[in-house]
Amino acid sequence: MTALSRRTVLRGVGATLSLPWLEAMMPKPARAAGSRPPVRMAVLYMPNGVHPEMWTPAGEGRDFELSSTLAPLADVKNEITVLTNLWNRSAVAGDGHYVKTSGFLTCTTVTKTLGVDINCNGVSMDQVAAQRIGKQTPLPSLELGTAPVTTGVDRNVGYTRVYGSHIAWSGPTSPLAREINPRSVFERLFRATQPRGDAAGQDRLLLDRVLDDAKQLRERLGRSDRHRLDEYLSAVRSLEERLERAGRPEELAWKPRAPLPEEARPAGIPKDFAEHVRLMLDMVALAFQSDSTRVCTFMFGNAVSNQNFSFLDGVRGGHHSLSHHQRDADKLRQYQLINRWHVEQYAYLLKKLRETKEAEASLLDNSMILFGSGLRDGNRHDPHNLPLLLAGCGGGRLAGGRHLVYRNDTPLSNLYVSMLEAFGAPVERFADSTGPLSGVLAGS
């Protein structure tokens, strides 16, 4: 069989979508004055857990000291809440990272599979919010990442790697496609805030072309490549409904809250990983500032990411490898430096939102930004006492500046019940929740 190139398959799509690697390829003006700003929600997901002894602050309530890992948050300490002793019970089943990643926002146990019959058995918390109020903005939600969807099978644990590439699920079998190119994200936001002609129609034509190409390509692939392609397309199909909605602007009584400056348009995916992350976080801020969407997720990396962090002083090697520290002191030291770097990026976004004024407050005041991982110690793959941070005021609905310590194994889903309440999309129950999480909401 003749070797295939990525261009052969995606000739109409440019940088918006990226096809997974296949064996056959081898030799994305403000509202009227006086209106109340909307609440936004973002989730930043960090793979591979944390150095457990270097994460938790000393003290409780408002009288707490940031740990060395959390030290980069000193300037925004009064606007964050550190949450201790929450766990995701559904993630206990299954070894490794995949159950803990795909189940992070669903609090359900994914179906163990090697192939295309993926099923997370729920809807992620962010999508519960998006489905409730997503029709108020051009983009119901925005899913971002830094790495393409990982396909194939992790034979060590018996799961398809696709589970490790998604935290956002619009339905049990519908993981949402992520944008990894900051320029594509900007252009998507730009089209949403400044529609010109039939841009959505053109996008639909391009997507149809991709799907048609994929159908023809499938007949030429071997069995393993067919599985990879089907896994990829299950995520791509989530774009169809969004493009259809974007093509009906008359149904959306919406105006951008702020313009997108042309000078903020990124050139593309930079080679430098740290710069890539910052650009993606800039896109989150622009999306919220313009009100193009009010729901966003961002994955710093896929599950089992072995991103090389040698660009950090004192670190030599990959993230996943160092997370399996086996209590080696030097590996633990490097692992903690990687954790701290991720917290620094979180702090960067929080400060950027705080510096963006909106009415009488800031964009951070009108947002809630969750940061966390689906496991605690990467060496043990432990879903107990997850590392979790919640920042922002949620439009005055959240109480920040505290370290909240709960009873061991308090459901993570209780936090999501409280966040959905603050977001304006209340639910009586989410997954295995037992009620709202005490202390998170203002006045609770």
Image (cartoon, grey):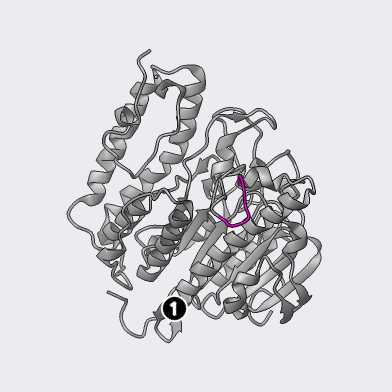
User: Up-down: is 359 above or below 419?
Assistant: below
Viewport quadrant of the C terminus: bottom right
Q: Secondary structure at mark 1?
A: helix
Residue drawn at point x = 53 percent, y = 63 percent:
345
In-image side of 103 versus 392 (left or right):
right
User: Up-down: is 425 above or below 155?
Assistant: below
Residue 231, position as x, y percentages in the image: 49, 33
First to last magenta residue range: 312-318
Viewport quadrant of the N terminus: top left
Q: Quadrant of residue 371?
A: bottom right
User: Up-down: is 231 above or below 410?
Assistant: above
> Quick one: 12 or 201, which is closer to the camera?
12
In-image side of 389 versus 325 (left or right):
left
Q: Is residue 200 visible?
A: yes
Label 1: how many Cα within 10 Å (few below 14, some 14–19, many 20+): few
Residue 150, position as x, y percentages in the image: 52, 37
Circle 1: residue type: Glu
Residue 181, position as x, y percentages in the image: 38, 49
> Quick one: 45 or 106, which is closer to the camera?
45
Residue drawn at point x = 69 percent, y = 73 percent:
66
Residue at the limit of the structure toward the left, as seen here: 197
Residue drawn at point x = 67 percent, y = 65 percent:
69
> Quick one: 386 or 435, which is closer to the camera?
386
* Residue position for label 1: 355
Residue 9 drawn in magenta = no
Residue at the limit of the structure toward the front, as seen here: 314
Q: Is residue 377 visible?
A: no
In-image side of 433 versus 427 (left or right):
right
Residue drawn at point x = 34 percent, y = 22 percent:
216
